[in-house]
Each structure stands twice: as C-alpha cells, then as structure tokens.
Image (cartoon, grey):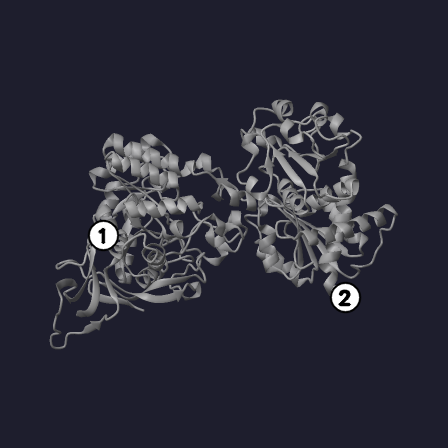
Amino acid sequence: MKHKDLLGLYTLEAEEIGEILSLAAKMKALVRAGQKSLDSLKGRSAVTLFYENSTRTRTSFEFAAKFLGASTVNISVATSSVQKGETLVDTGKTLDAMHTDFIVMRHPMGGAPTLLGKTVKAHVINAGDGMNEHPTQALLDMLSMLEAWGTLEGKTVAILGDIRHSRVAKSNLYGLTKMGATVRMFAPRTLMPAGLDCMGAKICRSREEAVEGADAVMGLRIQLERQKAGNFPSLGEYAKYYGVNEDILRLAKEGALVLHPGPVNRGVELTSGVIDGETSVITDQVLSGVAVRMAVLQLLGEEEIC
Amino acid sequence: MLISNATLVCGNREKRADLRIENGKIASIAPRLVPRKNEPVLDCAGYTVLPGLIDMHVHLREPGFEKKETIESGARAAVAGGFTAVCCMPNTKPVADNKVVVSYIKHRGEEVGLCKVYPIGAITEGQKGETLASIGGMKAAGAVALSEDGKSVENSKLMANAMLYASDFGLKCLCHCEDRALVDGGVVNEGYYSTLTGLKGSIRAAEDILIAREICLSESLNIPVHICHVSTFSGVQLIREAKKRGVNVTAETCPHYFTLTDAAISSFDTNAKVNPPLREEKDRLAVIEGLRDGTLDCIASDHAPHHEDDKNVEFDLAAFGISGLETSFALSYTALVRSGALTLPALVGKMSARPAEILGLAGGKLEVGAPADITVVDLAEKWTVDPSKFLSKGKNTPFRGMEVYGSVKYTLVDGEIKFCG
C-alpha cells in the first residue's frame, strides 16, 4: 500500500481496495483451513487503542494480529477521560516510544486517527472514528459480497438505517462506488445527512425504492439514544415504517444478500426472519472481518518486512 | 511630523497629499507641505495612508487566559496589523461583567501604550444569561459596548431588558447569534463537508434565528442593535431586509467568512474551526455582496488567539477561533479590493469610519483636528502568511502559506509611531 496508515476508504484507490480484498480472500481461506499461526508479522507489535467499547471489532483485530504472529496489547480508555486525561498526541508519542508497529484505534471523534497518524511513526489503522469512517468494516462487507458474487461491478447495495451517525455507511459508500457498485441509501429524514448524493449515493425516499431489485440489503444499527434525541418517536414506529421485514426484502433481487455490521437490534432495523434468512451473511461477515484485518496489517507492514 | 509624498484615503476618495501631525492630532492636509526646521519627515512615497484601522471585535484573553494572549501581545499584534484601536470582548476570567475588570483592561491597555484598547462589557453577570451585569458601572469604567460574545442571551425578555437598559447609558448590544439547542454540539457547518468528515454540523438557522430575534427586538423596542460575525447567506438577507424597512441594525463579518468555505475543514485542520463555522460558497459570495451593497457595515477580525495545546487535539475538542489581527487587512484588501468587489475607500470605511460610528469612538477619518491615528500601507507588496512571525501569541490561522497583498509599513497612534514594518 502507498499509505502509512489506513484512515478510511475515501483516500484509497480502487486498485488498493482490490489488493486488500484479494489478499483478504486468501487469508480467509487459510483461517478456514485452520491455519492460524502464520509468522509474517512475527516480532512486530500491535496495540488496540479503544476510546469506545467494542468487543467484536477489537477481538477481530486482535485475532488478526495474532494469527500473523504479532504480539498485541489492548488499551481501553474511558470516553469520559478523553477530555481530562492525557492528550491523544501524548498517548501517541508514548506508544511510539515503545516501538509500536501498529496502532488500531477506535475513537468517538471524527478525525482522531488522522491526528494520531500525523503524530506517530507507527501504522495507524482506523477502527472507527466518530461519524467519519470505519474502513475495515466496509472492506469486510465488500469481501462477503465479493465472495458471493465474484465481482462488485454493476451490483446494487441498499443501505438502510441511521445513515447520519454511521461511519459504516460512508466507508461502504466510498468503497463500493470505487469498485463499480451502486449504493442506495434510505433513512428517516432526521437521520439522513446532507451531501451524500454528491458523494455518489442514490438517496431514496422510501424503503421500497431502496430495496427494489437490489443485490444486497444492509441494515444499520438504530441506537435508542437517537430516539431520545427526538429523531423518531419510538423504536416500534421505526420498525414499522423504516425497518426491513420479509415483505420488504422480497422486493430485492432473488437471493439478495442481507448484511448488518452488528450488533443487531432484532425486530428494529431488521426482523428476525430477515436476519436468520437463507441469504443472510451476517455470521460470515465476522470471519471476513478477521481476514480483512489480517490483510490490512500485512499490507501496511509489508515494505519494512522485505 | 510630516507624512509626505503619500496617497491619502479621505472619506470616499483617494488623493495625493501631505499630512502634518502636531500634538497628536492631524494639523493640516495639503497637496504640498514644506517640512519645518527639525520636523521629522516620514517619506511615504509609494505608500497609502489610511485612517487608523479599528477592529471592533477581538479577544485579548487577559485577565485569565494569558497563555493564549495578553493585552500587551494582543496590542502588539494589533499595531502590526495596522489597527490603532481594538474593542475586546468580555469572555475573560473573571468575565468582564463589572467595573473592576473593565477598568483593569482599560488601564492595562493604556499602560501598554500601543493601540487604543476599548473594553466591551458582558450583558449578563458571568455571561450566564440570568441577570443583567452592572451596565452603568461598566460604562463609567470605560466600556464602549456590551456583548455576550461566544453565546446569545437565550432568554428573550432578558435580552429586551438588556437592550433597553443599555440604551439609557448609550451602550449598544453586539450580538453573537447562536441558538444553542439547534447547534446541539455541532462544530462545523452542516453540509457536504460535515458529512464527509463525520464532524457534527450545525445548520444556518442556528445563527439566523437569533439574527432574526435581535432584529425583531430592535424593531419592536426601537433600539439600535449590532450583529456580530455574520456568516450565512440567509443572515445577510435578514439584515438587508431589516435595513430596507428602516430597522436600526448594523452588522459585521470577518475575513474568514469571505475568503474561506467549509472545504477548509476537510482535512480536520483545527485552525479552521471557528464559531460561527465556515459555511459554503454561496454564503461566502453573499457575504461579499452584503459588504458591497452596505448590508454588512464593517469587517472585524474576531481575533481569537489560542495556544497550540488548545488546537493540537481532536477536532471536537479543539477551541474555536482564528488569530486574525495580523492578517485581517491584507486578506480583506486581497479578497475584496484586488478582486474589484470594493473600492479601497469603501474597504477602509468598513475597517475604520463605520466601526467608529457604530460605537461612537473617535477616529476613523483623516481630517484636520482628528486624532493622528494613522495606518500606512504598501498595497503593492505581496507577502506570505507565516504564523511563526505573528506577534500575537496565537499562531492559530488557517491562512498559513497564503499569498496576500498589502503590508503595514507604519502604525501611528495619537501621532506616535507604534509599529514600523
């Protein structure tokens, strides 16, 4: 890769995304075959620096690093201490001084990995920053789709849910459109931010419009705090007017994939029938996640290895 | 002292003339004045002589935030930027909401002895929006206006009372317009770039609603009001319409609102984090049109110096504000006069005579008998903004590396040279 850090898919080119996905597919096959002790990153160290809770993403990164032979350390920083504790720049300098090779960071504020990346010599991997990007999540979504279809070119992906607060939606938009897919988006108007049409999304005014004829349907998590902030009246009303149920899913192409970055609120953004349906790849996404993160670590670390 | 061979900006025209200063005042202006014996001569051939610039909206941070700026460092920055007078906002620590703090700022400004430092008092005690600050006392101590800068007085009844009571003392309210509930923690303009960066946006209405309220109060009560740092196209239009129907409203904008758009935040540059936020191209163009047609009366820098510690952090945690005193004139001259939007006298009016009129201050005119507050500039000189050369302690500028025209050669306050470029 041409970059020191993986901050987002906005700045990656299609070939780079393709490179990550093709290596990830190989990694996925290796892990499936039980090969979990590779040594390409032997002697390297990776820190997961999480300013937000996340079991799934952190575990995924940790396994990815360990499967490649790197040693890992987890650091959790309570969000509440961000403002009174050590500055991010100072934390970065400290980790750099320990010759850390990779810093995987999740942070509640957009742009935090950019600031860290400017500060440290280590490779920074964005594991989700505020409402900005979550590149490895989008890459894993794309890997699951790619494996099902063989190509992303010409495919249509419908993303429904809390688009406004979703870093996943944006990273998917950047990644999928670069790989030749069409991305449709639908959300309550209160949860749809400005400008996504200028970034290549097709903004839909109904869930039917979004889902009809789509090759994949992706639900995004609805957090209860959005209801408390007055974005919609209740989870029940959200599910009724904005959720994806079996009837809505039937409008998609036959065999359309169902994805969700998890954790899912069953019966809110997707009904259980949709989540557990035959074409759901929600569980497969998890393994794709490990594989994609292995590929990213490997590619970022590569040039120093040779 | 004799200023010779210069082009003078007098009122709405430029003329070739010499200017004599005696006892701190302008003693004569004539096409040709002969130096007297032992009279110092400032040869300003090729330069342009302006009435001393007045910045009616700066933050000098003292008392309380001396790490960011002091009255002395701020005043040095002011004279380096060509300003002979600045009006400083009350969000200090303690807040300038009483005669003691106001008096301290005024006297410290005199002690520093560079530019004139005019304190602005808070509207409410502690800027808390609950009870009126001691307005009479602050006026007596030297406050030239009132402002809650950094926020609005949320309670409309209290704001109405503030405007009425302040008018008894001849003080105007300078209104920072921001609906806090609507801003809801937003740090940038809501639009393409807030979505792109994932930074929380705030819509224009958050500013416009308060602009509209202050206009309504002014119209209802028949009290003049001044709107600070207008950034939205719709805010400009609200003010334009109000002026048209005779409301006594005046307004300012800042160089960053007519030179930058929110594209500047796309790389998470915290130096472009400012309140109100940088908006979109249509806002930038509307601000220029507002300056051109007189809707916007004046240009203020909203000089908001910060220490690097306040800016080298996550965007959400970074302080709002731009260190603007040393770039204000050149940015304005480059963006407005060289582009043909304003004539030089029109720009100078917005940076001297108009602020003086709005606040009832001396200065703003090159005329016999006026205080010899004078700014001498070389309009042809091109320079590159380099914050490491700022005299202000605040190096926070999004204009680093930008090429601008118009450099300050001399700044004279009451006839004394306070800055020599």
Q: Which mark is residue B117?
A: none
Q: Which mark is residue B353?
A: 1
Of the pair B150 and B46, the residue shown nearer to us: B46
Query: Which residue occupies the extreme bottom position in the image?
Result: B37
* Observer able to see residue B90: no
Amino acid at the residue labelled 2: Cys
Of the pair A234 and B261, the residue shown nearer to us: B261
Residues at marks 1 and 2 on the same chain = no
- Mark 2 surroundings within 10 Å by alpha-carbon count, few (fewer than 14), some (14 through 19), many (20 or more): few
Give the residue at mark 2.
A306
* For the residues bearing labels 1 and 2, Cβ distance under 8 angstroms: no
- Mark 1 surroundings within 10 Å by alpha-carbon count, few (fewer than 14), some (14 through 19), many (20 or more): many
Q: Is residue B105 left or right of residue A34?
A: left
The local secondary structure at tag 2 comes to loop
Q: Is residue A104 left or right of residue B342?
A: right
Q: In this picture, is A231 found above or below B2?
A: above
Coordinates of residue B250 in the picture (x, y in percent): 27, 42
Q: Where is the N terminus of chain A found, in terms of image quarters?
A: bottom right
The local secondary structure at tag 1 comes to helix
Q: Quadrant of residue A142?
A: top right
Query: Residue shown at 24%/31% (left/top)?
Result: B221
Query: Which residue occupies the extreme right position in the image?
Result: A33
Coordinates of residue B170 in the picture (x, y in percent): 21, 41
Of the pair B243 and A184, the residue shown nearer to us: A184
Give the chain letter at badge 1.
B
Coordinates of residue B166 in the picture (x, y in percent): 24, 39
Query: Which residue occupies the extreme front position in the image?
Result: A154
Q: Quadrant of residue A52?
A: top right
Query: Residue shown at 35%/48% (left/top)?
Result: B288
Q: Where is the C terminus of chain A found, in terms of image quarters?
A: bottom right
Amino acid at the residue labelled 1: Ala
